[in-house]
Amino acid sequence: MSAFLTSREVCQRLREAALGVLAFKVCEAPVETAMVTVDIDGWRLLLDFAGGQLHHCEYARSGDGQEGSLEHWQRFGTDPVSLLSTWELAQIEHLLNVQANEVAQ
């Protein structure tokens, strides 16, 4: 495993959450910004989620403390969200819509 989380490693967590293999929980719903903090089985992700659509992953931290950020991933031309299939993206957006509304209430 590399010192920094790769976009593929973060994408794999999102895929497994979309499939229901890993627990997905919205920790903080967006207030004024579009950023949503989620926990996927001990990993913390900061997602840009606005207008019901997931745009990109801004930051990720694994359970063992490894980190990755959009700034690092874009140097290599990939973002974890852009690696998701259409179905996986729709599943994650659905989870975000449902749970962000629950957290906000």
Image (spheres, rainbow, N blue to C red):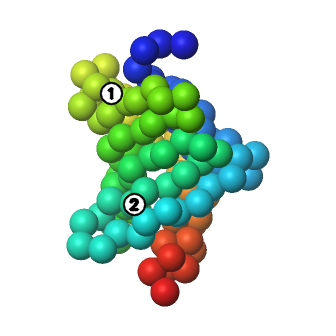
* Secondary element at tag 2: strand
Q: Which x, y percent locates residue 21?
A: 75, 46
Residue 87 can be seen in this image? no
Q: Give neighbour class at mark 1: few <14, some 14-19, many 20+ (Cα, 10 Å).
A: many
Residue at which label 2 appears: 36
Q: Nearer the viewer, residue 93 or 24?
A: 24
User: For residue 3, what is the image quadrant?
Assistant: top left
Please determine whether, in this image, residue 84 is positioned above or below residue 102. above
* Secondary element at tag 1: helix
- Spot the residue most to the front: 64
Residue type indicated by callout 1: Trp
- Spot the residue most to the right: 21
The quadrant the N terminus occupies is top right
Q: Residue at x 28, y 25 (%)?
A: 72
> Which mark, by number, is residue 46?
none
- Spot the residue most to the bottom: 105
Q: Which x, y percent locates residue 52?
A: 42, 69
Q: Residue at x 36, y 41 (%)?
A: 59
> Which mark, by number, is residue 73?
1
